[in-house]
Image (cartoon, rainbow, N blue to C red):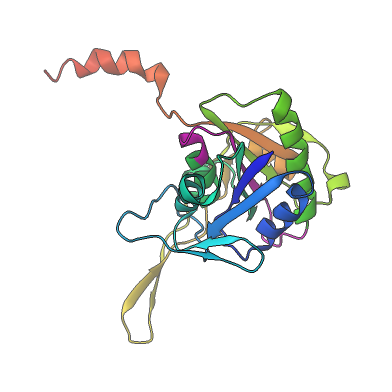
Amino acid sequence: MNILLSNDDGVFAKGLAALYSELSKQHQVTVVAPDRNCSASSNALSIQSPLRVQKMDNNFYAVNGTPSDCVHLGINQLLKQEPDLVISGINHGANLGDDVIYSGTVAAATEGRHMGLPAIAVSLASKEAKHFGGTAQIVSDIIDLLVEHPLPADQILNVNTPDLPYQAIKGIQVTRQGRRHKAESMTKAKDPHGRDIYWYGDVGPELDAGEGTDFYAIANGYCSITPLSIDMTAYDSLESLSYWIKKIK
């Protein structure tokens, strides 16, 4: 299989190298990744400045853009033929619940889907991130199954794994997104020149993390796979909204 691999942690990230090492045993893998950490960049595209590409000694492509830029550029310019699959990861840290809204990891996968290709976002749910190898093997297993069971055209898979060796992961659970409490307050500080600066606080703790959620699976030693729809239309609200909106005009 011809795979385009990207991430949001940057071209030098350990998770990217681990996933490339595993997948390249069986597949043709091309890496196009940001030249720096682009975490929480969501689906941003660089439309105000040109993109530049550097081919590194290991044949990875480093791009001065966002994860979405990397996927778009890889498909349109850098790959000799269109890939069969786009994979983003392995992210250093979880992308659970509300995280997917901000995640550059998930965004790279959705960009692949926007361009008509099946896509997977992959994250290791740990700040320490010791066991990238186990996550990489899980992804390899998923790819084998995707050949027989292709993804629907409007969906990607969001995969999170606990920070455990492959053999210690209890299994795989298909989950829904949980939800977090609102994020912590922003912090105000001073720069060396005495000017005000502001930092985002920590993400909020889990609010909806019960059985069946991605949070629950990870907390109990399972890999979580959540199918995410690219079409964000709230179809169950169309009828009621159409009814009361008529009152405007």
Residue most extreme to the right: 167
Residue 221 visible at all: no
Residue 185 visible at all: yes
Quarter occupied by residue 130: bottom right
Q: Does 39 appear above or below 206?
A: below
| Residue 15 or residue 64, whichever sits in front | 64
Residue 66's x, y, as percent? 45, 56
Residue 174's x, y, as percent? 69, 30
Residue 235's x, y, as percent? 41, 19
Q: Does 125 appear above or below 14?
A: above
Left/right of residue 176 with respect to residue 51 in the rendered view: right
Left/right of residue 40 with respect to residue 20 in the rendered view: left
Image quarter where the C terminus lies is: top left
Left/right of residue 5 with respect to residue 65 in the rendered view: right
Residue at image coords 71%, 43%: 218
| Residue 89 or residue 100, whichever sits in front | 89
Residue 228's x, y, as percent? 55, 32
Residue most extreme to the bottom: 193
Residue at image coords 50%, 39%: 110
Residue at image coords 48%, 41%: 111
How many dots with numbers?
Answer: 0
Residue most extreme to the left: 249
Q: Is residue 248 magenta?
A: no
Quarter occupied by residue 61: bottom right
Quarter occupied by residue 11: bottom right
Residue at image coords 65%, 25%: 150
| Residues shaded magenta | 112-130
| Residue 183 or residue 222, whichever sits in front | 222
Q: Is residue 113 magenta?
A: yes
Image quarter where the N terminus lies is: top right
